[in-house]
Amino acid sequence: MTEQPGAADEIMDGVYRALCRHGYADLTMQDIADECSKSKSLLHYHYDTKEDLLVRFLDRVISDFECRVERSVGSPPVDRLVAFVGWFVFEPAETDRESFHIALLEMRSQGPFNDRIREQLLRSDRLLRGTAAEILAAGIDADVFRDVDVEETAALLVATLDGARTRQITLGSGLGGGSDGESNDEAGSAPATDGAYTRTVAEATLRRIVEPLLAEDVTLPSLEEAIEELTARTGENPTGDSFPEGLTIERPPAEAGDRNGNGTGSGGETTGSNGKKIGSSDEELE
């Protein structure tokens, strides 16, 4: 059959839209097929199970973030660190992204019970902390950051920002309206939505963690400007793990022996539940 290089991207976009619409727990292969131009039988031909397809999707999400990190290496370290903080911000109107993050949170809850999902989550965690540490080290070498423990500081940054995003997703509320910082939500009622929580925490992170790192006479770029630049560059307010409808997931350059660019980056080869490589070719995807 005729090879169609964009078909795998269509499937990955379909997974994204299906996760936004149905979440993780209720997601079926038919839901994914409905969101792309492929049949359910064709999905099963390339991915034995829903788990195989979702693991592949996670792999592609992480590989996309790796590409973004690689492209940013030549930028000033201070700008890169502010952009890194900005990746974790999403706004109240971004309902698609919020739905997607809810689905990802459902998938993360499977980590203790599913080795393959846990491996992708560990890979993501290593990438986030490693990226922050690399930016900090570059800034120290360039004399724009004070000499600090980069691994410890990177862990603090990621824990703070990822924790804020998780809280916004799970509680829908921010810093709380009470003087003691507690939420004013009544017991048994839905929490009041404060979609600006990730931005609030990002701004506090820059003030409390990043600014004290700056060397003398080094100024901190605006978070708003960093987010606007990221938005203009990618067509979205990016976090490295979500994609606007109609845009395909960016793939890393093809590795040797893989003509379709389906390499998994640093995460290694993705295998199915039966041990065979999955989603490794766009052939016969029509």
Image (tube, rainbow, N blue to C red):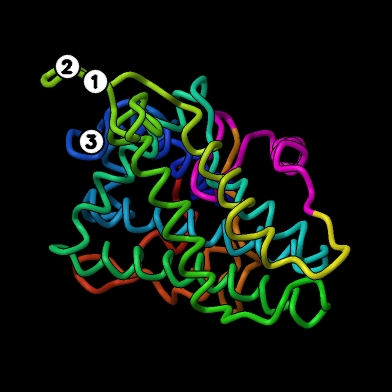
Query: The residue under label 3 is which amino acid type?
Result: Leu
Depth check, mark 2 against mark 1: the one in front is 1
Depth check: give the residue in front, 195 or 260.
195
Sequence-first tag of 3 and 1: 3
172 part of magenta stretch = no
* Residue in the image at 20% along x and 69% along y: 115
**Do tag 2 and tag 1 residues touch (Cβ < 8 Å)?**
yes
Q: Where's residue 93, x and y in %?
A: 51, 20
Depth check: give the residue in front, 31 or 146.
146
Q: Alpha-carbon distance for marks 3 and 2?
A: 27 Å
Q: Name the residue under label 1.
A: 185
Q: Where's residue 214, x and y in %?
A: 75, 66
224 part of magenta stretch = yes
Q: Which mark is residue 27?
A: 3
Query: The residue under label 2 is which amino acid type?
Result: Ser
Q: Alpha-carbon distance for marks 2 and 1?
A: 7 Å
Q: Is residue 169 left or right of residue 251?
A: left
Relative height, residue 16 to residue 3 (above, below)? above
**SS assignment at label 1:** loop
